Amino acid sequence: MKGSSMLVRPSCAVIASLLIICTCVAVKGEAPWKCRIIDGTSRGADGVKLADVNRDGLMDIATGWEEEGLTRVYLNPGPAQAKEEWPFVMTGQTPSVEDAVFVDLDQDGAVDVVSCCEGGSQSVFVQWAPKSKDDYLLESKWRSQIIPVSKAMTRWMFCIEMQVDRHGGVDLVAGSKEPNGRIGWFEVPDDARDLKTYKWHTISPAGWIMSLRTVDADGDGDLDILTSDRKGRMRGCRWLENPGIGAAQKKIWPNHFLGCRDKEVMFLTVADIDEDGLQDVLVAVKSSKGSEIVILRRLDTRGRSWKEYVIAYPEKTGTAKAVVVGDINGDGEQDIVFSCENAKAPKSGLMWLSRREGVFDGHWQAHDISGPKGIKYDRMELLDVDKDGDLDILTCEERERGKGLGLFWYENPHDRTGRDPVRQ
């Protein structure tokens, strides 16, 4: 039963302490993957979000360029042209942008963009897409507006779409960082274009939100919110329990910690890493022992019981930033890809991990992807960009100057058989 006492304190979920520290050894002599630049013409690329906005079966990209103060959309040109720069449009000026995400907010079939901004802006922008698909790359056809209630409230970090109140179209769940850090949702009215009538509802305090995901954490049929909170008294990986339809949704939601309360958590991902039918959580963290990947193994269907497993970052890498899971070498097993910041040469900023034994009881091997190129990588997406049957890695880099980085993808060198042609 969802009692009121849960609304004012963290739940006492069963969180086992560190169980196994997995070792990670780098494989020497591997060549970096080929880097394919999508756009290196601006500064401060900060994140990649995907959607098929023109319904051609190819995933397109939304990216905010923080230092340039703008948001761009990139249309996937298809595998034959994907190794060249992609066509793009600037959807609007977005000062200090931290995140840009695709949302068809007014449900007119044209996919809009929502940008979250911190710094002096401290606003959430909606960039309305042109209604005609043929005009999507025309900057003059886009219209950018601030959600009034968001202005000067807090330093906005991330936003996701979610149908919260089951009324009208989609709503927007957003998270921020101090001062006034919080997680909450914008109640979108029937007329989504009437931005002045949007209402904000805080559902949790926050220190520095790094990730927001919608999941049915407790298996009750509605969507909850999974987050990684980097700083403050609520730091760690946790999920917010949807209290169900009604007035309770506009108040503080029950909070449940998964783990990592003593660590600085960065970006997380959700994956059934041990293939036991339960979705686990993996997160890149900074701890007193250095940078690590923590696997939060889910032990029950209600999201109350978890165990922590740690994989230490290998030597000669930067500090923890993000993690994703997928079969990188085509051998049928789940691998881990991680990214770094503070990866000044000769350190590597992007690597992937393979295993020869079980997920929790074996040695992981680290394989280089980026080499010394890049300093501050961000969150990643795994996508077969060139349609050759393996997973490539889409990401961006914020800090390297004059080297043509920015928004790009790394071409997976493995073929469909799982062999690595670089090492043949």
Image (cartoon, rainbow, N blue to C red):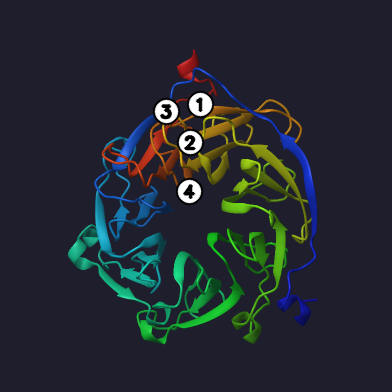
Q: Nearer the viewer, residue 346 or 378?
A: 346
Image position of 337 (left or right of 127): right
SS at circle 3: loop
Residue type pointed to by label 2: Leu
Relative height, residue 141 to residue 188 (above, below):
above
Identify residue for label 1: 416
- Residue at coordinates 41% horizontally, 87% vertically from top-left? 197
Give the mark, 2 or 3, whose residue is nearer the N terminus.
3
Label 1 and label 3: CA atoms lie apart by: 16 Å
Circle 3 residues within 10 Å: few <14, some 14–19, many ≥20 = some
Work out whether 256 lies above or below 74: below
On the question of residue 328 being in view, the answer is yes
Query: For this rendering, which residue is in front, 194 or 359?
Result: 359
> Do the residues under discs 1 and 4 have CB atoms within 8 angstroms?
no
* Mark 1 residue type: Arg
Residue pushed farthest front? 288
Give the SS element for disc 2: strand
Query: Quick one: label 1 or label 4, which is nearer the N terminus?
Result: 4
Residue 165 visible in the snapshot: no
Q: Quadrant of residue 22?
A: top right
- Badge nearest the viewer, 1 or 3: 3
The front one of 243 and 174 is 174
Name which residue type carries label 3.
Answer: Trp
Residue 281 vertical placement versus 422 (above, below): below
Give the CA separation, mark 4 to mark 2.
Answer: 11 Å
Name the residue located 60 percent from the left edge and 53 percent from the top edge.
Answer: 265
Q: Locate the N terminus by quadrant.
A: bottom right
Q: CA distance from mark 4 to mark 3?
A: 18 Å
Q: Secondary structure at mark 4?
A: loop
Query: What residue occupies the far left of the structure in this picture?
Result: 140
Query: Mark 1, residues whose alpha carbon is within 10 Å: few (<14), some, or many (≥20)?
Result: few
Write the residue at 48% across / 25% down.
414
